[in-house]
Amino acid sequence: MIELTGVNKWFGEFQALKNIDLSVARGEKIVVCGPSGSGKSTMIRLINRLEAHQSGRIVVDGIELTDDLQAIEKIRAEVGMVFQSFNLFPHLTVLENLTLAPVWVHHTPRQEARELAMQLLVRVRIPEQAAKYPGQLSGGQQQRVAIARALAMRPKVMLFDEPTSALDPEMIKEVLEVMIELAQEGMTMLVVTHEMGFARTVADRIVFMDQGEIVESGTPRDFFAAPKTDRARLFLSQILGH
């Protein structure tokens, strides 16, 4: 579904990603973890061209990401993205936030878009919030709206960039529950997160990054029980406290 081969990314003199090779199979759930500044968010942003890579290849569902705008639009239509900061339109209701893109991008009839939006709000467990504005919701509710909005485009892949890091602890659980359900339904997911309980529950594979490189990758069982590198061991001791 996603193939990164020899991908490099610089910001000026700083090399943010170094020879990244990663393939994500259809239906696979990958959790990307690592210390801050390790390139995790940059890598995920390359996949729907929020950032451009300077060398290497990125192919999503058979389409190579280049400067070709048509290819970028095609990929963005297939790839849903959920950010740290919910990025909802504050002047639109929850329902309007969900129907905007399907109506404008996919030319979905308005009534059909509304019906889908309501189904998705039921799925993320907040149908009663449809007429409210984002500012009237808790952080956990806003993030669930953001997930529903991404799903409204019927994506083949969902990218999550630290979706719970801006939330209070009691709200994290409600967002992770929605993500776990999505995973169980077979969605292809690439998730940057520090939520190691979620990683154990959901991930088919954990990818550990540090200093712009993929240092190791393996099953959750192997990664938590016997990390192969000192860098991963140090990271786990810091994050798990042992």
Image: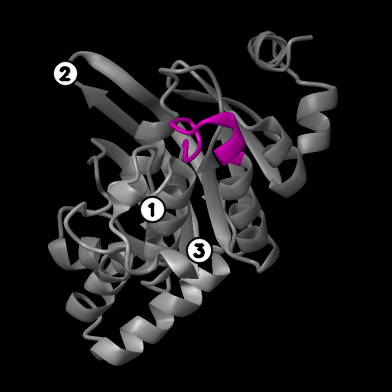
Mark linked to residue 81: 1
Q: Earlier in the sequence, mark 2 or mark 1?
A: 2
Mark 2 vs mark 3: give the one in front.
Answer: 3
Q: Is residue 23 left or right of residue 218?
A: left
Span shown in magenta? 162-172
Mark 2, residues whose alpha carbon is within 10 Å: few (<14), some, or many (≥20)? few
Q: Earlier in the sequence, mark 2 or mark 3?
A: 2
Residue at position x 68%, y 40% from top? 198
Which one is nearer the viewer's eye here, 171 or 30? Answer: 171
Q: Position of residue 66 (x, y in %)?
A: 22, 53
Bin the neighbour count of mark 3 within 10 Å (Cα to Cα): few under 14, some 14-19, many 20 and up: some
Q: Which residue is mark 2?
A: 12
Q: Is residue 175 left or right of residue 36?
A: right
Q: 208 and 201: which one is in front?
A: 201
Q: Is residue 191 above or below residue 237?
A: below
Left or right: residue 239 versus residue 40 is right
For mark 3, give the secondary structure: loop
Quarter of the figure that contains the C terminus: top right
Q: Nearer the viewer, mark 1 or mark 3?
A: 3
| Inter-mark Cα distance, 2 to 3 | 43 Å
Where residue 131 appears, x then y in whole percent?
A: 32, 68
